[in-house]
Amino acid sequence: MKKTMITLTTALVVLIFSGAVVAGAVESLRGEQPLTENAKEPAKKQALVVKGGIERSYKQQPPVIPHAIDKDEINLKVNTCLNCHSEKTFEAKKAPKVGDSHFIDRDGKVLKTISSRRYFCEQCHAPQLNADPLVVNNFEGVK
């Protein structure tokens, strides 16, 4: 009896999975290219440059980067974003100042320099490219 139940269950599982495969093929962003081949190198896209910045889509969204950052460098010793966005230079460079929240450590203590948690800008602030979306997107931000 147990063997019959196991056999029937196995057959049912095989039928379900084979039916799902036949019912509809999943379309990949790779197109018709098989997984065994290397991916094609994507075309180079230009950074989207928007004078005055890009409007945020929701209240707590980190601002996106409205300029090219190809030559910027961020490592343990250098953060070239601060050349324009630091408290000392933002007015002369006509750039937004680093937010006050970037000077608070995880214990809530206010620091004189940027917190190590906020030092690597690209963790939250994303550069924008002049490219079409890969998939349909109906997202509308808060106005």
Image (cartoon, rainbow, N blue to C red):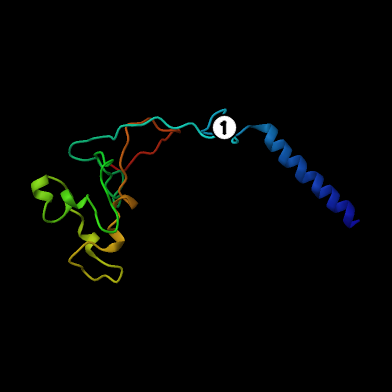
Q: Residue furthest top?
A: 32
Task: Answer left or right for 27 relative to 18.
Answer: left
Q: How many marks?
A: 1
For residue 60, above or below residue 71: below
Is the C terminus in the top left, top right, bottom left or bottom right quadrant?
top left
| Amino acid tagged 1 | Glu
* Image location (x, y in percent) of residue 18: 73, 38
Quadrant hosting residue 107: bottom left
Q: Residue at x 77, y 40 (%)?
A: 15
* Image location (x, y in percent) of residue 57: 30, 43
* Image location (x, y in percent) of residue 14: 77, 43
Q: Residue at x 81, y 44 (%)?
A: 11
For residue 130, above or below residue 81: above
Secondary element type, mark 1: loop
Q: Which residue is mark 1?
A: 27
Task: Answer left or right for 116 relative to 33.
Answer: left
- Mark 1 Cα shell of 10 Å, populated few (<14), some (14-19), many (≥20): few
* Image location (x, y in percent) of residue 81: 22, 50
Q: Residue furthest right?
A: 1
Quadrant hosting residue 48: top left
Q: Residue at x 64, y 32 (%)?
A: 24
Is the N terminus in the top left, top right, bottom left or bottom right quadrant?
bottom right
Pick the front one: 48 or 40: 40
Task: Answer left or right for 21 relative to 100.
Answer: right
Q: Residue furthest left?
A: 92
Pick the front one: 69 or 51: 69
